[in-house]
Amino acid sequence: MNVQYLIDLAASSGGTLYLMALLLLVALTVIVERAWYLYRLMAGGRHINERVIDLPRSRSDLLQKEIDQAGHLPHAELLKVALSHPEINDRQVLADRLEESILHEVPKLDRSLWVLDTVVTLAPLLGLFGTIIGMFNAFAGLGQNGAVAAQVTSGVAEALIATASGLFIAMLGVSFLNSLNNRVRLLVHQLETLKQMLINRFSYSASLDGGRTSAAPLALARTGS
């Protein structure tokens, strides 16, 4: 199988095999980029949650250190919320503001996954389209003088390569799409867990329940009171 044969094969499919190659390249690009991005977020978020779970109640100085270490992780945005307006950190108000922050971060997690979803849907259809064009070309040879059945069946077999290519891309894409969607789900669970931990440690009611402050706002805790 040489390069010229592949070129002729792509031409017999109406050029759809060229589009198949482009779809495969797009799918692999999205898979590699999202897999690496989500892996880094999950690893960094897991460490943050493990450290926050050991934080004493209302220790804003330690929380600030966590924010500095978190960098650009979405978990850092939730940590900032607990420190942004401590004078209104009623439990329900803090919960609502943390939930708002999560809603802002979630679209960043599954960004570009719609492209992979589109490739999974489009590849089999495009492969079928290429096969139909290839079969038209194969059966058109029946009307030519000297055409034999072997030539026709060979053309049909080559036309089916387009369908096989589309199915391969779709199977590859759907496997990684499900895996990446699962990682997004686990990351959202990380954020929800962090949200609950911050509510339990940095709301007024949490301070009152823990007996560390009477009715003193979190702002006093920040100054060392």
Image (cartoon, helix red, strand yellow):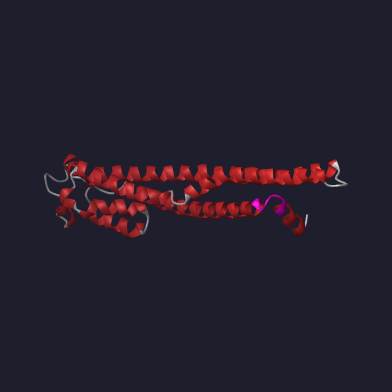
Q: Going 52% across and 53% down the picture, which residue do you hit?
A: 30
Q: Which is nearer the eye, 10 or 188?
A: 10
Residue 7 lies, in percent from the top left, at: 72, 57
Q: Does residue 63 appear to the left or right of 113 in the view shown?
A: left
Q: Is residue 74 visible?
A: yes
Quarter of the picture holding the N terminus:
bottom right
Residue 20 lies, in percent from the top left, at: 62, 51
Kindly indicate the quadrant of the structure image that contains residue 6: bottom right
Q: Going 23% across and 54% down the picture, which residue do you hit?
A: 83
State whether residue 63 is above or below residue 174. Answer: below
Q: Does residue 82 appear to the left or right of 104 in the view shown?
A: left
Kindly indicate the quadrant of the structure image that contains residue 207: top left
Quarter of the picture holding the C terminus:
bottom left
Q: Does residue 115 appear to the left or right of 214 in the view shown?
A: right
Question: How many callouts does the rendering have?
Answer: 0
Q: Which is nearer the eye, 68 or 18?
A: 18
Q: Residue furthest right?
A: 146
Q: Is residue 173 visible?
A: no
Q: Which is nearer the eye, 94 or 28?
A: 28
Residue 174 lies, in percent from the top left, at: 55, 42
Q: Residue furthest top?
A: 209
Q: Which is nearer the eye, 118 or 85?
A: 118
Q: Which residues are magenta?
A: 11-16
Q: Going 80% across and 46% down the picture, which residue do you hit?
A: 141
Residue 167 lies, in percent from the top left, at: 63, 42
Q: Residue furthest left?
A: 215
